[in-house]
Amino acid sequence: MHKKYIHLALTLFVFCLCTTSIWAQRNVSGRVTSADDGSGLPGVSIAISGTSTGTVSDVDGNYTLSNVPNDATLVFSMVGFATQNIALGASNIVNIVLAE
């Protein structure tokens, strides 16, 4: 009987760990614009630092990333522009201005 309770407790513990890691992620979106004229920048690489997960901004500079950890840092880079590292705050919208 004692082993049954230990098995149940371990199962619940593992379930809680798995669901917590799922809930600790979110979707992040925004727009990347040029410091020169404020226009949207297409083709900007947006990556989650330390991972191989990322995306590229569309023709208007918009992007969306799914399953982003709450403590993530996003790396914005494009040839000819200064790379920026942005630690996520409370907002799910991260707009960024890149300078040459």
Image (tube, grey):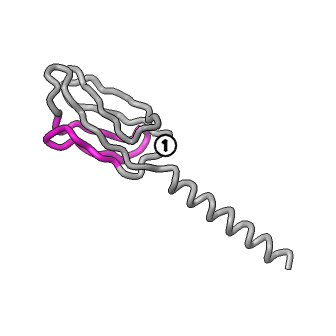
Q: Quadrant of the C terminus?
A: top left
Most foreground residue, 93 or 75? 93
Instruction: Pinpoint residue 59: horizontal percent, then vertical percent.
Output: 13, 41
Q: Nearer the viewer, residue 48 or 70?
A: 70
Residue at figure coordinates x 41%, y 52% from the top left: 67
Residue 56 in the magenta stretch? The answer is yes
The reply, left or right, for residue 62 in relation to residue 49 is: left
Q: Secondary structure at mark 1?
A: loop
Q: At x 24% / y 33%, what residue is drawn?
A: 32
Q: List the single residue furthest toward the bottom.
A: 1
Residue 78: quarter of image: top left
Q: Which residue, given by chain and number where applicable, does mark 1 sit on?
A: 70
On the picture, is 1 further left or further right than 75?
right
Give the x, y percent position of residue 11.
Answer: 68, 69
Residue 27: x, y in percent? 38, 49
Instruction: Please name the residue shown 29% across and 30% down the image.
Output: 96
What kind of residue is marked 1? Asn
Q: Quadrant of residue 21?
A: bottom right
Q: Position of residue 3 (x, y in %)?
A: 82, 75
> Is 87 placed left or right of 76 in the picture?
right
Relative vertical location of residue 95 with respect to residue 92 in this rendering, above or below: above
Q: Which residues are magenta?
A: 41-65
Q: Is residue 16 magenta?
A: no
Position of 6 relative to 30 (above/below): below
Where 26 sits versus 32, above or below?
below
| Residue at the (38%, 36%) spot, across then down | 74
Q: Assign the N terminus to one quadrant of the image.
A: bottom right
